[in-house]
Structures are given as C-alpha cells and as structure tokens.
Image: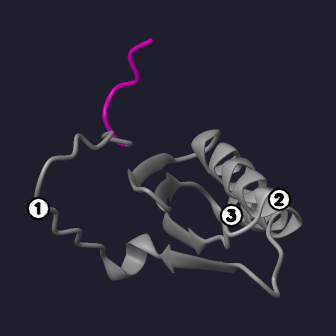
Amino acid sequence: MLVIVCYDVNTETREGRRRLRRVARVCEGVGQRVQKSVFEFQIDLAKMEELERRLLAEIKPEEDNLRLYRLAESRGCEVREHGVFKATDFDGPLVL
C-alpha cells in the first residue's frame, strides 16, 4: 500500500531542529522524499505501524505534528504530479 507521511516539527529551538533531522532520517531510511516534509512509502501494514512507532518516538506531540495517510490499493490510487520531481517506480525493476 502507498503511505504518505507529512510532518511539521517546531524548529524554533535547537532541540526542535534536531528532532526535525531525526524525523527526516527515519523517513529517508524507508521511503522517498517528495516534498521537504512529505514522504511516500510503499510498505505493508506491519511496516507502517513500525514506521509510525519510530516517528512517534522522535516527535514532541505538544509542539510538532505528524500525519500518516494510508492509501489502500483496492480503492485505487491516483497521484497527479506537476513540476520538477523524479519519482522512484516502486513496481519497476530494482537496479543496484
């Protein structure tokens, strides 16, 4: 399934800027960045829950915001894209 994660971390303090980097690092390890604070993931439910748990461990809920959108394949998914961006084709062959 396709999962969209977006976050807004309060960066007014040094600790906030560190949290922002840690949240991005967690996302970069699993998904692809599509905007500064928006990532796409092609993962199953178990990995989504693990990702959510890891992200919740990094944010400060009273200052930050985290949103996860789960897009089930059975309902179809259409992404309209405009502008400069080179997306990874998750369904295509993996070249190392």
- Magenta stretch in the rendered image: 91-96
Instruction: Mark 3 or mark 1: name the one nearer the start of the chain.
Output: 3
Image coordinates for residue 17, horizontal then vertical, percent:
70, 56
Residue sitting at the far bottom: 62
The answer to whether 43 is drawn above or below residue 86 in the figure is below
Residue 36 rendering spot, x and y as whole percentages: 43, 56
Instruction: Provide the residue designation for mark 1.
Output: 82
Q: Which residue is mark 3?
A: 48
Judged by depth in the image, the label closer to the viewer, 2 or 1, is 2
Q: Residue visible at 14% across and 47% down?
A: 84
Residue under the point 75% across and 63% down: 16
- Report which quarter residue 35 is drawn in: bottom left
Q: Earlier in the sequence, mark 3 or mark 2?
A: 2
Q: Main secondary structure of the magenta part?
A: loop
Q: Amino acid at mark 2?
A: Glu
Q: Please state which amino acid type lies under the numbered disc 1.
A: His
- Does dot 1 land on a helix, a strand or a loop? loop
